[in-house]
Image: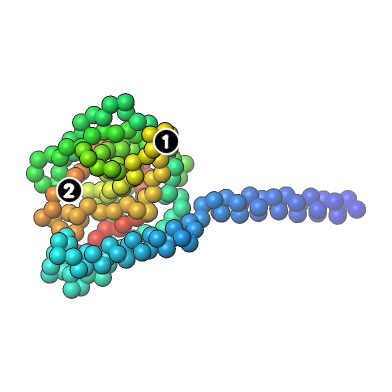
Amino acid sequence: MRKLWIAGLVLAVLGLLLYSVAGTQLTKTLDEAYLAKLREARRQKDQTLHNAPDSPIPGAQRATFAGLRYFAPAADFKVTASLTRLPVLQPQPLAMSLGAPESYQRWGTAEFELNGQPQKLTLLQKAGDKQLFVPFTDPTNGQQTYGAGRYLDVPLPPAEANEVELDFNQAYNPYCAYNHDYSCPRPPAENRLTVPVMAGERAYRLE
């Protein structure tokens, strides 16, 4: 009887552990509706880059353009960040890859964790825009991703919000990743993430 009781206790503990693991996995799973929307957005971007007259893909490369490359979507890189707004927007000129700096405003900051490591990004806004601009760098730059960094666009949070979602699966390359004739904003030094962001758009292969 004692052995049966111990065996039952062990099974119960294992069951709780499995339930806990399964629950954790479920909270980190991207649902199919999200994945379908992401795939469609990427398909449309490829189509635009291939066909649009003002595409940044050089004309000589469009015939062989086979689409952009991405990391597999990852729930761990879709994070909810603590949001801090600045009481007054502050000027923040960004260095450009070509030419003079471009005017942006410091809107606030977002603090969050990636792989258990605390991170912080400055949120910028261009005058008149209805979204926030988040240029960033990370350890993948120059290897798996574009060397000068990538961008995120974030919808302007409601006035009462104290959190903001940062979805690095939607990180994208500046136009100068495809064509060096373009001038693109450089991420500020403070927007350097310490964790490799294996999400979003990968480095573009010049054919």
Which of the 4 image quarters holds residue 74? bottom left
Q: How many discs mark residues in the rendered view?
A: 2
Residue at image point 48% right, 62% down: 32
Tell which tag, 2 or 1, sits nearer the viewer.
1
Residue at image point 12% right, 70% down: 60
Asked if residue 206 is positioned above or below residue 110 in the image, the reply reads below
Q: Secondary structure at mark 1?
A: loop
Asked if residue 122 is positioned above or below residue 72 in the image, the reply reads above
Label 1 sits on residue = 161
Asked if residue 19 is positioned above or below residue 88 in the image, the reply reads below
* Left or right: 96, with 41 as reference point: left
Res. 68 mark: none
Q: Please say whether residue 80 is visible from this viewpoint.
A: yes
Label 2 sits on residue = 184
Dot 2 surroundings within 10 Å: few (below 14), some, or many (20 or more)? many
Q: Earlier in the sequence, mark 2 or mark 1?
A: 1
Could you tell me residue 71's position as x and y percent?
Answer: 37, 59
Nearer-the-camera pick, 14 or 179: 179
Residue at image point 37% right, 31% down: 84
Nearer-the-camera pick, 100 or 117: 100
Residue at image point 88% right, 50% down: 2
Asked if residue 83 is positioned above or below residue 66 in the image, the reply reads above
Could you tell me residue 17's position as x and y percent?
Answer: 66, 50
* Left or right: 63, with 88 as reference point: left
* Left or right: 90, with 86 as reference point: left
Label 1 amino acid?
Ala
Label 2 – label 1 distance at C-alpha:
30 Å
Label 2 amino acid?
Cys
